[in-house]
Image: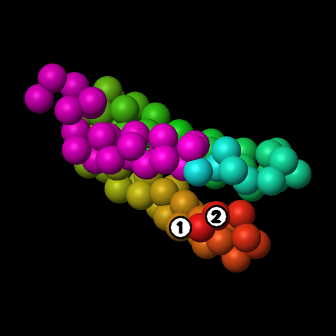
């Protein structure tokens, strides 16, 4: 393994962050600084924290704590769907 980019979990988190970014482009303009901003920042945070944890070589413990952060993602997606912002 060369680095954090080789981690399957990093690759999946990165892919999901890009999908969230693309999907959130269709959100209403009035949500730009609330739900849209929050969901984009949280998805990028997961990716950044995996990389940081790997660099610190605390990967298993750091990653476990970051899963709690990532747990918010489905709630934001569910909220977006409920108010008609996502398919």
Specify whether residue 52 is in view.
Answer: yes
- Quadrant for the C terminus in the image: bottom right
Ranked by sequence position, the earlier of labels 1 and 2 is 1
What residue sits 53% from the left and 39% below the top? 44
What residue sits 51% from the left and 56% below the top? 69
Query: Label for residue 64?
Result: none
In the image, residue 81 lies in the stretch drawn in magenta: no
**On screen, residue 13 above or below 65:** above
Q: Residue furthest bottom?
A: 82
Q: Residue furthest top?
A: 2
**Label 2 packing within 10 angstroms: few (<14), some (14-19), many (20+):** some
- Quadrant for the N terminus in the image: top left
Specify whether residue 38 is in view.
Answer: no
Q: Which residues are magenta?
A: 1-22
In the image, residue 21 lies in the stretch drawn in magenta: yes
Query: Label for residue 86?
Result: 2
- The reply to whether dot 1 and dot 2 touch (C-beta < 8 Å) is no
**Label 1 packing within 10 angstroms: few (<14), some (14-19), many (20+):** few
Query: Label for residue 74?
Result: 1
């Amino acid at each position: 393994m060369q680095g954090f980019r080789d981690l399957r979990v990093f690759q999946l988190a990165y892919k999901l962050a890009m999908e969230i970014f693309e999907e959130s482009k269709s959100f209403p303009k009035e949500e730009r600084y609330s739900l849209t901003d929050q969901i984009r920042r949280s998805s990028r945070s997961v990716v950044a924290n995996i990389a940081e944890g790997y660099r610190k070589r605390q990967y298993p413990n750091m990653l476990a704590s970051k899963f709690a952060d990532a747990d918010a993602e489905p709630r934001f997606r569910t909220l977006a769907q409920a108010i008609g912002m996502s398919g």
